[in-house]
Image: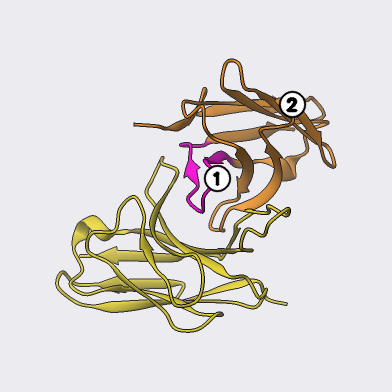
Chain colours: A orange, B yellow
Amino acid sequence: GESVGLHLPTLSVQEGDNSIINCAYSNSASDYFIWYKQESGKGPQFIIDIRSNMDKRQGQRVTVLLNKTVKHLSLQIAATQPGDSAVYFCAETENDYKLSFGAGTTVTVRA
Amino acid sequence: NAGVTQTPKFQVLKTGQSMTLQCAQDMNHNSMYWYRQDPGMGLRLIYYSASEGTTDKGEVPNGYNVSRLNKREFSLRLESAAPSQTSVYFCASSEIRLAGKVSDTQYFGPGTRLTVL
């Protein structure tokens, strides 16, 4: 079946460095992608989204890149801070209400 | 503006007991969702309600029922709880798709941690 997954389950980053979190998806018909951040004991929090008619979208300290040719999505976090430590999920949908989530990448920021 | 709220935050049940998880949103969203999250896994959709008066099955609906009470509230019921339903349950809401304006961002509540013994 179709699935969304992340390349690495964990990522350790030095404070101040840039982080790159990757996600591969298999449904070529997906047209909307979202990155969520989930801190321990909390619900997922929206970070940034991108539609399939775009390759790149920037937010505050975050950038999402979409490569539809290889069905790859990435989240870049600039100048990673201790507050960025969390689990990051990518999610995708094929023009309907149902989001499919990847398993998540746990980001740990080293001081 | 509280966003999405869920009650209770924690619950322990015995096998065979029933309970209802409550969810409410104050963002005037049309669509609401119930997910479960198991350790080391992403969220899986149980049921969703695209608009008031409609509900549809998601990826893992067995053992659950839902009620869209009104536009604000969407409840999830376990009629006969099983240990396999031990999980963290999240409710979410989003705006309905409108012609020319597609905004599917789902906003999540804080979750209900359910343990079935």
Specify the label residue B29 is tagged with.
none
Read off the chain for label 2: A
**Which residues are drawn in magenta?**
A88-104
Q: Tag 1, which chain? A: A
> Residue reaching furthest front?
B99
Residue at the (48%, 41%) spot, across then down: A101
- Residue A63 position within the rendered picture, expressed as x and y whole percent measured from the top left: 78, 32
The residue sitting at 39% across, 68% down in the picture is B55
Q: Is residue A100 above or below residue A53?
A: below
Disc 2 residue type (three-letter): Asp
Query: Residue at point 56% right, 52% down?
Result: A40
Query: Does the stretch in magenta take in B46?
Result: no
The N terminus of chain B - image quarter: bottom right
Q: Which mark is residue A55?
A: 2
Instruction: Mark 1 and mark 2 in contact? Answer it, CB < 8 Å.
Output: no
Label 1 element class: loop
User: As displayed, is residue A108 above or below residue B6?
Assistant: above
Q: Residues within 10 Å of mark 1 (few under 14, many from 20)?
A: some
Report the front residue among A85 and B78: B78
Q: Which residue is mark 1?
A: A95
User: Quick one: quadrant of the C terminus of chain B?
Assistant: bottom left
Tell me if A31 is positioned left or right of A104 in this view.
right
